[in-house]
Amino acid sequence: MREDRIMTEVGTNEWQVVVFTLGDQSFAINVDKTREILRWTGVRPVPQSHPAMLGITTVRGEVIPLIDLRIYLNITPAVPLEQSKVIVTEFNQMKLGFVVDGVERIYRIHSEELDATLTGTFLGENVLYVIKRDERNILLLDYERIVQVVNPQLAGQYQVDSTRMHGAVSDLGDLDQYKILVVEDSPLIRKMIQDVLAKGGFHNVEAVSHGKAAWDRLCDEGEAFDLVITDIEMPKMDGLALTKNIKEDERLRNIPVIVFSSIMADDIKKKAQSVGADGQITKPEIEQLIAKVGELLRKRREVGSKNHEGTASLG
């Protein structure tokens, strides 16, 4: 799969999706989440698990949980289980397989093609966006939400020890003086990030659902923000394009940007570095995120103090 990718340029808002089918409906998943596509591998059941968690399989010695998206979404399969395909994915620092009816092709799309206006009409909160291609609707699922529902233990990974959290930011003074912009399209993850920041004492937090909304806010009152936390996969403007815009803007370039994404393969890390990201944290490493927030705000405060001293000495 990885060898067949058409590499997209950094900051162009272009990415690629694998299109697959469940019943008579087409769905998509980001290529950067996809590791390989396999024929049915067989499964060993896991007791007392979610109905959609078929069990585990072994791929080249590695144990992979299998989630049947047809069961999860209540879609009648178009083929018997033995004829199903398994999309092996890797995100949130874990590998798992999604069981589907069939896999079609790879599409190269622009983030502006992601339509959120129809989201509520297709499978409720499980669908983030609709992509219109070849006179059909291709649904892009909220895979992070699905995994959290099927395996609730993962939700605990977005919790953090209060003592360690306060230790990472205890020297920053009144935390409400710092304004943080969170850019995340998944409603579930967006709320989790806000809750964790609030638990750590950061209450002056604004959250938006895509890069274009973040860019508009920054253009309106960029100086008011002290730090940006952004996902990568988003409509209208993705996180890499947003970071590139910030770092190329003379007024905004000093605002630290943390890329907090479920996909942090080496090529994605290189892209984030190339557009000037100040930090890169892989979901769900929330403690690392808080530590990086403290580090960058501390550095920003020190630079501001030095600039103020320099201006005062000139006066």
Image: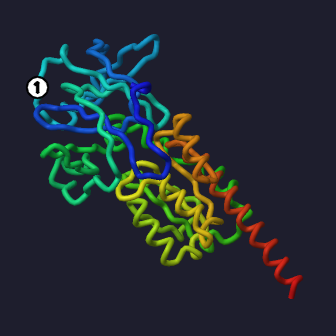
Quadrant in which residue 142 is drawn: top left
Image height of 299 relative to 286, above or below: below
Quadrant in which residue 24 is drawn: top left
Q: Nearer the viewer, residue 11 or 211?
A: 11
Q: Along the horizontal axis of the image, is 218 left or right of 128? A: right
Quarter of the figure with the C terminus = bottom right
Residue 187, x across and y down, in percent:
35, 55
Q: Nearer the viewer, residue 70 or 36?
A: 36
Identify the amino acid type marked 1: Ala
Residue 104, x across and y down, in percent:
22, 29
Quarter of the figure with the N terminus = top left
Residue ranking furthest to the bottom: 315
Residue 300, x across and y down, in percent:
71, 65
Q: Nearer the viewer, residue 69 or 198?
A: 69
Colouring rule applied to residues: rainbow
Q: Is residue 51 visible?
A: no
Residue tagged by mark 1?
A: 78
Residue 221, x across and y down, in percent:
52, 77
Q: Residues within 10 Å of mark 1 (few under 14, many from 20)?
A: some
